[in-house]
Amino acid sequence: MTVEARTAALRQRVADLERAIEEVFLGHHEVVEELLLAILAGGHALLEGAPGLGKTTLVRTLARVLGLDFRRIQFTPDLMPPDVLGTRILVEDPGGGRRFEFQRGPIFCNVVLADEINRATPRTQSALLEAMGEGQVTVFGETSVLAPPFFVIATQNPIEMEGTYPLPEAQLDRFLVKVLLPTPQERDLARILDETTGAPKPPTAAVVGAAEVLDMQRLVREVPASSDMVRLAARLVRATHPDDERAPEVVRRYVRFGASPRGGQALLLAAKARALVHGRLHVAAEDLAALAPAALRHRLILNYEGEAARVTPDELVAAALAAAQAK
């Protein structure tokens, strides 16, 4: 099959996936697309929104239409790493002997919903680092590989901060994108109220499967990015650093640390996925511009003045993008 044919097939599949998801999760096409782009790019996603906006419904529906195994972990202050990764238990053989056997935790699936991840202690949060970064889990010195595809989609509530533990920078950097889930507009809200208070709909059927998801991820990796686009991504990442000569004044004033090289990788991979979904066989500047906020907003660390001024990461990313495009 030619690249053009594979690209056309991918576009059709993504359209089918979006349509299936939006039959259940109503009113946020951009959010659905950004999550699907993260899946195509092979990365994890952090989903931030107020309670009651359907974050769990969205992730569960996403896993169902992708035909992937799904587990939901409710993060609470008393959750421990073995509750996520698994632990060794003592079992008795038929002959009377005893041995330790590894009992796998809920992390061993394709799609993990880490619900309210910032409610768990840093110790439990860090239990996800190896799984997210390397696709494996090490318990008591024994390493187990997670079957691909593997995605962590974490949610957090931006409103209620009491009793929460903010994610450390190393944890945030593992997420390919941070997707913001806004409150729906009146028209969308009316549709949500109408469709969710009537007779329940039948479960959504799978559209693709694990093998097809992996094939789409491989195709995304094959999308070329010209040297100009790679340099644009590099300029953008550097422009988020206050010590860079290209950094705009707002970044110099309010940012303590800018995005990491992993942020540039996330931006370029997500841009490749977007290019394919929008019918292009190469990365364009509009792909980088469209995904810059999602790929970089959670990687900027504000200084004290920035926190006091309540400047938003998206404002800083927009200023850095303008500076990078100006060359």
Image (cartoon, rainbow, N blue to C red):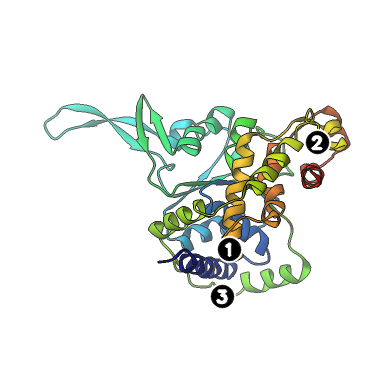
Mark linked to residue 246: 2
x and y, in percent, of residue 135 in the image? 44, 39
Residue that appears at 72% across and 33% down: 258
Circle 3 sits in a helix, a strand or a loop, which is it? loop
Circle 1 sits in a helix, a strand or a loop, which is it? helix
Tell me which corner region of the image, top left, top right, bottom left or bottom right, holds residue 161.
top right
Q: Is residue 120 left or right of residue 108?
A: right
| Residue at numbered disc 3 | 199
- Which quadrant, please, contains the C terminus? top right
* Nearer the camera: disc 1 or disc 2: 2
- Dot 3 or dot 2: first in sequence order is 3
- Dot 1 or dot 2: first in sequence order is 2
Q: Is residue 187 left or right of residue 25?
A: right
User: Furthest-front residue in view?
Assistant: 227
Classify 10 Å Cα crowding around label 2: few (below 14), some (14-19), many (20 and above): many
Classify 10 Å Cα crowding around label 3: few (below 14), some (14-19), many (20 and above): few
| Residue at numbered disc 1 | 277
x and y, in percent, of residue 88 in the image? 33, 30
The type of residue carrying mark 2 is Arg
Position above or below: 220 against 122:
below
Circle 2 sits in a helix, a strand or a loop, which is it? loop
Residue that appears at 79% across and 27% down: 243
